[in-house]
Image (tube, helix red, strand yellow):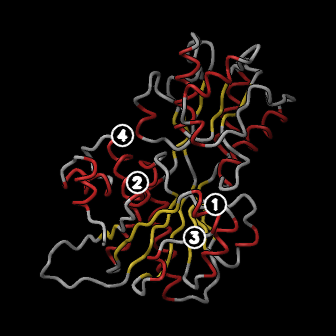
Amino acid sequence: MKCTIIDIAHALNLNRNTVSKALRNDPGVSEKTRNAVIAKAKEMDYQMVISQNEDPGLSKSTDSVLFLTRASMNYSGFWMTVMKGIEEVLKLNNYTLSLAMMDDEDIRTLHFPPVVHNPSVKGIILVELCDLSICNAALDLGLPCVSIDMPKDYESLLNRMDIVTMENKFYIHQYVDMLVSKGYRSFAFAGDIFTYNVGRGFKERYDALVEELAVHQLLLNEKASILRSTDKELMNSSTIISFLKELDELPEVYFCGNDWTAMQVMNAVQFLGYRVPEDISIIGFDNVIESSTSLPALTTVNTPKEDLGRAAARCILNRIKAPDTPHVFFQYMTNAVIRNSTNF
């Protein structure tokens, strides 16, 4: 039997309106509740169809684009904001947006949700699915595909899939240069750059740090860097605390793969009695809403999330209409967001 919003609401003891708002990333729903709703939706195999045309008296398109993402309770606010940009463009073109999720086992076994075979689905936008095998398998479905971010080894996809991403290096170079000029010498990185589903973005952020340190004849503090932990482990402050306790000395600066990791590192170092930024400066990436309310507020790099969504939607619609046009590699510039977690 098809799962409905009401079924999810009953399972979580929430009202229907709250579940609907959580799935659409509307304001007024806490991050904890939103994450619980998304996790339950995956568990119950819920297929969300989002249509901006709410008037039942108007005709609705049967064509849809599938937002296919990794089932994860982490970072949902980021991707829901991207989804808003996608919806905005699809609405103007009379398409609906469907949401489906794949867990880690699905990704390893290349097991796609049944909705990919629905005739109404005309294209797929891949989100947080950065393993090259899953990208190739998605292309084998015969549908136009757009990836937001991309596999670390993405070159083989360039003439086969449209890619929309963000510039990852420029402001990390700038931040390192500013910190070195103030006398900082010990830098570490926290973020998964090795597991199978990690996107190119994390690797480029790590590379930028190492490259700019080399310009100043400095080396990355590899002993203090956290590079092989999964995103689930990095979302657990106690795991990071245990790691930091084993260090003889903490670095002066932690660059982190994203804001969520940065906030967990901040929690861990403060738990151990260090001050941010007096003892350790911490820098994130993405500028999620929570980064402005952390204590202290997090220095980060802003990613234009809704613009990424709009660009992905335009790419998939163009690919549906003109499948033989040259493929697109599209990159948005980011911008600096300097707050109190650093001594700039």
- At x 26%, y 53%, the residue is 19
Determine which quarter of the picture holds residue 268.
Answer: top right
**Callout 3: few (<14), some (14-19), or many (20+) C-alpha neighbours within 10 Å?**
some
Q: How far apart are the two marked residues, 4 and 3, measured between alpha carbons?
A: 28 Å
Return the mark for residue 111.
3
Q: Position of residue 83 (x, y in %)?
A: 41, 61
Q: What element carries label 2?
A: helix
Q: Mark 4 belongs to which amino acid?
A: Lys
Q: What residue type is labelled 2?
A: Thr
On the rendered image, what quadrant is the C terminus found in?
Answer: top right
Query: Which residue corresponds to the image point at 36% horizontal and 46% vertical from the top-left?
Result: 36
Q: Which amino acid does label 1 sit on?
A: Cys
Q: In this view, does 297 lie above or below 323?
A: above
Q: Position of residue 180 (x, y in %)?
A: 74, 24
Cα distance between the residues tagged 2 and 4? 16 Å
Which residue is at a point 45% across and 22% down the rendered structure image?
295
The Cα–Cα distance between marks 1 and 3, rounded to whole angstroms, is 15 Å
How far apart are the two marked residues, 1 and 2, measured between alpha carbons? 19 Å
Around disc 2, counting alpha carbons within 10 Å, would you say few (fewer than 14), some (14 to 19), or many (20 or more)? many
Location of mark 2 (residue): 81
Counting residues from the N terminus, which is met first, the one under dot 1 or under dot 3? 3
Q: Mark 4 highlights which residue? A: 32
Callout 3: helix, strand or loop?
loop
Gap in Å between the C-alphas at discs 4 and 1? Answer: 25 Å
Q: Earlier in the sequence, mark 1 or mark 2?
A: 2
Q: Residue lying farthest top?
A: 273
Residue under label 1: 130
Q: Quadrant of residue 61?
A: bottom left
Q: What element carries label 1?
A: loop
Please rate how many residues cluster around mark 4, counting C-alpha atoms within 10 Å: few if below 14, some from 14 to 19, many from 20: few
Is 37 left or right of 213, judged from the image as shown? left
The first of marks 2 and 3 along the sequence is 2
